[in-house]
Image: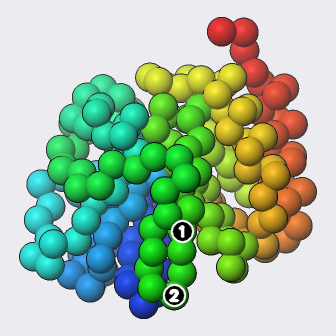
Amino acid sequence: MGNTYWLNAKQKAIIDLGSHTIAKRLPLDEACCIILTHLHYDHTAALDQLVFSNGAKVMMHEADAKNIGTAASAAHAFSARAPKFHVDTLLKDGDQIDLGDSILRVIHTPGHTPGSICLYDAQSKSLFSGDTVFPFGGIGRTDLLGGSSHDLVQSISRLAKLEVSVLYPGHGVITTDSVDEQIKQSLKFAKANESPE
């Protein structure tokens, strides 16, 4: 399953929720929102039929939200059915999610899925990268439904222009080690793996 992040901001938030086990351990009713970096099953499975008594808002990019419950979730890769859930807020590039003492900027980064997003906190220079980039020059796969190696290169090119001190990836370890250089390595790797479309 993908990584889940609990943001202990003034307005508490969750980024991605793929594991039912983790979901049971979190105080879900304290969260104002659950932000999904993309549609894939390993980042959304725990939302299946989930009801929030406190009215927490589920947020996702509009390009992925329209494919909820379809094969685009890649649930078949986990021998599961696509989770069904309601999205309250459709995100788009440039949106800002205000958590009171932290503001996350939505960066639309298609490539892994059409509606993949990253979330950037300019104050702490933190990047929640979903499955767009991973530590040590890794990149998200583009061979699943809706993936595009060309789009991924364009998306990582945008990320390479940011000043990033901490990378919170969708899989793997959190890293603070020359993150800007790691993202540049991801861009180089993505360009090397770009296929003609």
Q: Residues within 10 Å of mark 2 (few under 14, many from 20)?
A: few
Kind of residue at disc 1: Leu
**Label placed on residue 59:** none
Dot 1 corresponds to which residue?
104
Q: Is residue 70 left or right of residue 126?
A: left
Q: Is residue 84 left or right of residue 196?
A: left
Q: Is residue 139 above or below residue 161?
A: above
The quadrant the C terminus occupies is top right
Residue plotted at (25% across, 29% down): 70
> How far across and how far down the image is residue 188, in percent?
87, 37
Query: Disc 2 on helix, strand or loop?
Result: loop
Residue plotted at (48% across, 31% down): 114
Q: How is the image coloured?
A: rainbow
> How far across and how far down the image is residue 58, in percent?
28, 60
Query: Disc 1 on helix, strand or loop?
Result: strand
Let me know if residue 64 appears in the view.
yes
**Label placed on residue 101:** 2
Q: CA distance from mark 2 to mark 1?
A: 10 Å
Q: Is residue 92 above or below residue 73?
A: below
Kind of residue at disc 2: Asp
Residue at the extreme top of the image, as rendered? 197
> How far across and how far down the image is residue 46, in percent?
26, 58
Tell me how many marks there are.
Answer: 2
Let me know if residue 130 appears in the view.
no
> How far across and how far down the image is residue 7, in percent?
47, 80
Residue plotted at (12% across, 54% down): 49
The quadrant the N terminus occupies is bottom left
Rendered image quadrant of residue 64 = top left
